[in-house]
Image (cartoon, rainbow, N blue to C red):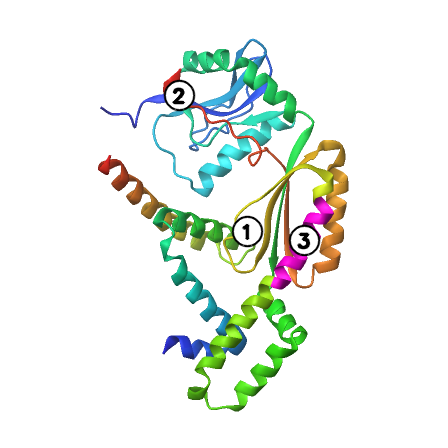
Amino acid sequence: MFLIDSILLAPLKGVIWMGQKLGDMAQKELSDKGRIKEELMRLQLQFELDEISQAEYDQKENELLDRLDAITDAEEKEI
Amino acid sequence: MDTATKEGKYIYCIINSDRPQSFGPLGIGERGDQLHTICFNGIAALVSDAPLGKYRVSRENSLAHEKAIETVMAEYAALPVRFATVAEDEDKVKRILEKEHDRFKDLLGSIADKTELSLKAIFKEEVIYKDILEKYEDIKALKEKITALPLEKTHHQRMEIGEMVEAALQQEKQIVKENILNTLSPLATEVKTNDTYDELIIINAAFFVEKAKEADSDQQVQLLDEKYGEKVTFKYVGPLPPFNFVNICINTEDY
């Protein structure tokens, strides 16, 4: 199991990671749009802290913005 | 109807000026559109030609929006207008300035001598968990106990230790957060704390500071960095347009 593996490889970091996953599940209620925006902010921070490259950033940003557009378009069609 | 190709005036901010003026080819959309002012009775909108329609919140677009405002901030106090506000033409911009003249004047007066400084503080992942393990004896003890047991028997304890580490992290965050706020809030006229969208972010805050106190604030952040720098990354940015304290929403259809 992936979860157990990651605990084995990095004991302390592993348990935190698990805690995070459990937290994520509790946050399922959060709207899709809100979640994408949060991801965008996290992505931006990673970029600002030099954790990811410009190319990685651009690619992921593009994916997230496409998803955001798709939701917005769907909402407009409903109205 | 093809709205995508129709041109309008993208509005960045409102300033005190009655001078038609250009600020360089920095308009949003990377077409080299000139930033320029449209004036009415002592106030002006900073605009550039740009297509009517939707604007993605990409880094490129939001940076263009921010840069435009920062360009005029060297000379003027600027009231930021909400991202992606585009009016049909120059007349429409003038009508907005005319109708909202007094409100804009008042707001410009209230921000004139202040500036926004933004601070993010983030725990360094590799350091903080090690710190917690050293500092919290109960976690350390439980971890040592678990390590000695066969893996399949420790599912429950591992959940427990996860919760304990999480609680310890919250506690550590709270300590540093309070210290930061207690240090910097007295220097600011307003403080806004925004969502922390990541486990390791201690604080994500904006401070509205009188220009006269900007240097004090810089110095205090320097001291915080000396105090916590080993386990905390600080991201301190400013002076910024006061996005967190005023952001003018103009519904262009109303004018």
**In this figure, which residue is indicated by the disc labeled 2?**
B252
Same-subunit check for callouts 1 and 3:
no
> Circle 1: is it few (<14), some (14-19), or many (20+) Cα within 10 Å?
few
Q: Report the chain holding disc 1.
A: A
Question: Which residues are the magenta region?
Answer: B171-184
Residue B167 in the image: above or below residue B39: below
- Residue at the spot 52% in from the left edge and 49% down from the top edge: B195
Question: Where is residue A47 shown, x and y percent of the image?
Answer: 51, 53
Q: Amino acid at mark 2?
A: Thr
**In this figure, which residue is indicated by the disc labeled 1?**
A48
Query: Under tag 3, what secondary structure?
Result: helix
- Residue at the spot 56% in from the left edge and 60% down from the top edge: B200
Mark 1 or 3, closer to the camera: 3
Q: Nearer the viewer, residue A11 or B162?
A: B162
**In this figure, which residue is indicated by the disc labeled 3?**
B178
Q: Amino acid at mark 3?
A: Glu
Mark 1 or 2, closer to the camera: 2
Q: Mark 2 to mark 3: distance in Å?
A: 42 Å
